[in-house]
Amino acid sequence: MLAKLKELLEHIEGSIDIDNIQRAELLHGGALNWEKVPRLPVIASYPYPMDRRLVPFPHGQVFDDPEKMLYNQLVSAFDSSVYLNNEVGDDLPVTIRADFGCVMIPSMFGAVVEQVDDNPPWIRQNGHISYEDIIGISPTDFDRGIIAKSAARYQFYQDVLKDYPTISRAANIVMPDLQGPIDNLELLIGSGVFEDMYFKRDLFLKAMDVVTQAQIELVRYFGRFVNNRIEGISFQHGFPLKGGILLRNDTSIMVSPQMYRELIAPFDERILKTFGGGIHSCGDVNRIVREFISVKGVQCFDFGQSELNDVASVYQLAQEIKIPLTRVAVTEQELSSCSVLENYPTGVSLIFRAKSFQHAKKVISEYKTKL
């Protein structure tokens, strides 16, 4: 085993605080269920302090190296760190996933995956994939694309972590990023998918049907590796979420609420009615968020950039139907003064984007000691 990975695992195995992790999980669960909580759960995001003995590998090195990927998942993932969590003192859960970015389902349908420098894998759209190609591919052909490689990565995690019982007890092995039906189709077809909603509607809907079924089948396929520790809770990008899956809907903010409701929501609904879960979107969702939280089966809404949105109005909508909001960005002043609790007493989890590791420690400590 890689010496740095062994050192890291032994350190975490001997230092992880199960009681604190369980308290944080209860806090997240209470907020997600709109229960009265002593404080809102908060996760800090910060640049990794590169003066530490253990530092992350360059991102470009992890995709073909399972040991480096596991190492980075624990040292620095999503701008947080399981390794440093005891020092920061936030409510970060222990999560590990096969982290190949957002290309998994497109790779099944013949998309060209490329990875450049330290960027995550991406799809090179070459105009060679047609709707007929997509419709003709079986949604259960798991030998295509990077599916087998991802499954092997999960098997590697299981094989390594069985020798570390405390980490195994604390860790949530979680789903890979499977995106959502419209995001996957846009990755395959390109921006022309928006025009096709009008002029190739029949083919668009048939392709959406196939990529939706592929996502359902992949959730079942990877389910043998997943061990979400809390009943009714799953995890993505380091945050607990209600239900079994998080659908990405970044592409949907480019269409009208009516088009989302008519052409995209029925496919989101099929997945959410099967597994329960949440909808995520980056960007400005003010215009369409009512549609997102009205989809049958939706159990939470996950912000990508809450700073771009009228969170108070979204919270009012969500509160009426008890749909929790996750990753609501909060300022230092709101945390240090605890004024955030006046606006959002429950039903919300917070993200604090700190300027540095020391800044994260300071503000999280102030927040917790004020209560």
Image: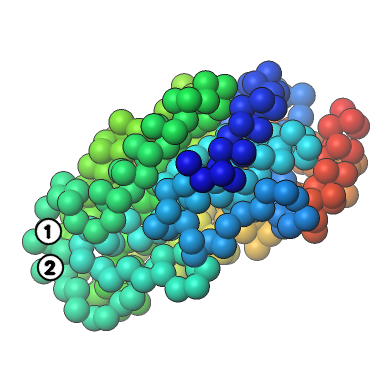
> Is residue 230 shown left or right of residue 92?
left
Is residue 354 in view? no
Residue 279, percent from left and from top: 46, 47
- Secondary structure of the residue carrying tag 1 is loop
Does residue 5 appear left or right of residue 19 in this picture? left
Q: Position of residue 184 (x, y in %)?
A: 32, 61
Q: Position of residue 344 (x, y in %)?
A: 73, 38
Instruction: Tell me the CA gap for discs 2 and 1.
Output: 7 Å
- The numbered disc on residue 137 is 1
Crowding around mark 1 (Cα neighbors within 10 Å: few <14, some 14 to 19, many 20+) is some
Tell me which residue sits at (80%, 58%) in the image: 355
Q: Please tell me which residue is depicted at 19% across the width and 79% down the height of the picture.
A: 128
Question: Which corner quadrant holds the C terminus?
Answer: top right
SS of the residue under disc 2? helix
280 shown above or below 24 = below
* Residue 163 in view here: yes
Local packing at callout 2 (Cα closer than 10 Å; few below 14, some 14-19, many 20+) is few
**Disc 2 target residue:** 133
Q: Nearer the viewer, residue 233 or 163?
A: 163
Q: Amino acid at mark 1?
A: Ile
Amino acid type at image mark 2: Asp
Identify which residue is drawn at 89% across, 30% down. 369
In this rendered view, identify the residue nearer to me: 35 or 315.
35
Quick check: 140 left or right of 350? Answer: left
How was the colour assigned to the protein in this rendering? rainbow
Marks 2 and 1: CB-CB under 8 Å?
A: yes
